[in-house]
């Protein structure tokens, strides 16, 4: 779908590497209370990217063609967001911020390692969409008996995280397609 022009030009596109990294921050430290296993989020993001980008691996390239291209995808930062209320006696403090995925793509010629283009995309759902996702009645009925904040799940489920990765990947691939 995205690489139709490349096939017509006789070029092949290969997947170089997929990397998921995240820098620590105060917000991520707070959201790790509700999602303590951040390695599973990174693995889920990487697995989703490999599923979306069904390209042959660069190491599996047979005969080297001078017109071949490779793409490296890096998720340089991600945040799972938060949608919680903290209760302290008579006061309640809302903790609300949106999830975010920052993704970078680098397209290069594998033979010479010359960069053809590089793009970065930052995806955050809109506030209305984020509030709708978290004020879903069906979601709250499933968690009705949970009263301990440590027992509550993260505001972002696996399907939501896959959706965010898919959206940022599509936006990134559209930008890359314009340049090659």
Image (spheres, helix red, strand yellow):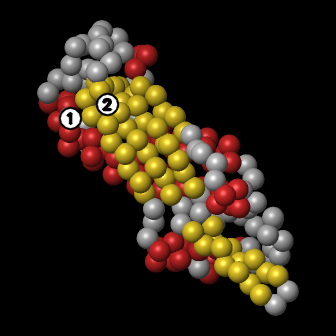
Q: Quadrant of residue 21?
A: top right
Question: Seen in the image, is 4 located left or right of residue 149?
Answer: left
Question: Seen in the image, is 84 located left or right of residue 60?
Answer: right
Count of numbered badges drawn on the protein: 2
| Position in image of residue 123 (x %, y %) | 43, 57
Residue 163 shows up from this direction:
no
- Residue 79 position (above or below residue 1): below
Please tell me the numbered disc located at residue 107: 2
Q: Secondary structure at mark 2?
A: strand
Residue drawn at the location 30% of the way across and 13% of the way down: 111
- Residue 51 position (above or below residue 83): above
| Position in image of residue 133 (x %, y %) | 54, 72
- Residue 90 position (above or below residue 20): below
| Position in image of residue 110 (x %, y %) | 33, 18
| Position in image of residue 144 (x %, y %) | 76, 78
In contact (CB < 8 Å): disc 2 and disc 1: yes
| Quadrant assignment for the C terminus | top left
- Mark 2 → mark 1, Cα distance in angstroms: 8 Å
Residue drawn at the location 57% of the way across and 55% of the way down: 79
Residue drawn at the location 81% of the way across and 73% of the way down: 146
Please tell me the numbered disc located at residue 104: none
Q: Who comes first in sequence, dot 2 or dot 1? A: 2
Residue 93 shows up from this direction:
yes
Q: Categorize mark 2 by other alpha carbons within 10 Å: few (<14), some (14-19), many (20+).
A: many
Residue drawn at the location 27% of the way across and 47% of the way down: 174
Instruction: Give the camera-side residue of 128 and 23.
Output: 23
Q: Would you name the residue on which mark 1 appears?
A: 180
- Residue 26 position (above or below residue 63): below
Instruction: Give the camera-side residue of 160 and 97.
Output: 97
Q: Secondary structure at mark 1?
A: loop
């Amino acid at each position: 779908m995205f690489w139709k022009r490349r096939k017509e030009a006789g070029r092949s596109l290969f997947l170089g590497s997929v990397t998921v990294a995240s820098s620590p921050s105060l917000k991520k430290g707070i959201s790790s209370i509700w999602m303590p296993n951040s390695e599973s989020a990174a693995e889920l993001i990487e697995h989703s990217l490999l599923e979306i980008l069904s390209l042959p691996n660069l190491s599996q390239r047979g005969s080297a063609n001078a017109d071949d291209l490779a793409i490296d995808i890096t998720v340089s930062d991600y945040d799972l967001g938060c949608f919680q209320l903290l209760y302290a006696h008579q006061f309640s403090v809302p903790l609300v911020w949106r999830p975010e995925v920052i993704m970078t793509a680098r397209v290069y010629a594998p033979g010479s390692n010359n960069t053809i283009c590089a793009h970065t995309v930052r995806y955050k759902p809109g506030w209305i969409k984020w509030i709708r996702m978290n004020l879903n009645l069906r979601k709250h009925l499933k968690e009705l008996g949970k009263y301990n904040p440590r027992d509550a799940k993260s505001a972002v489920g696996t399907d939501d995280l896959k959706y965010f990765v898919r959206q940022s990947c599509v936006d990134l691939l559209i930008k890359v397609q314009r340049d090659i």
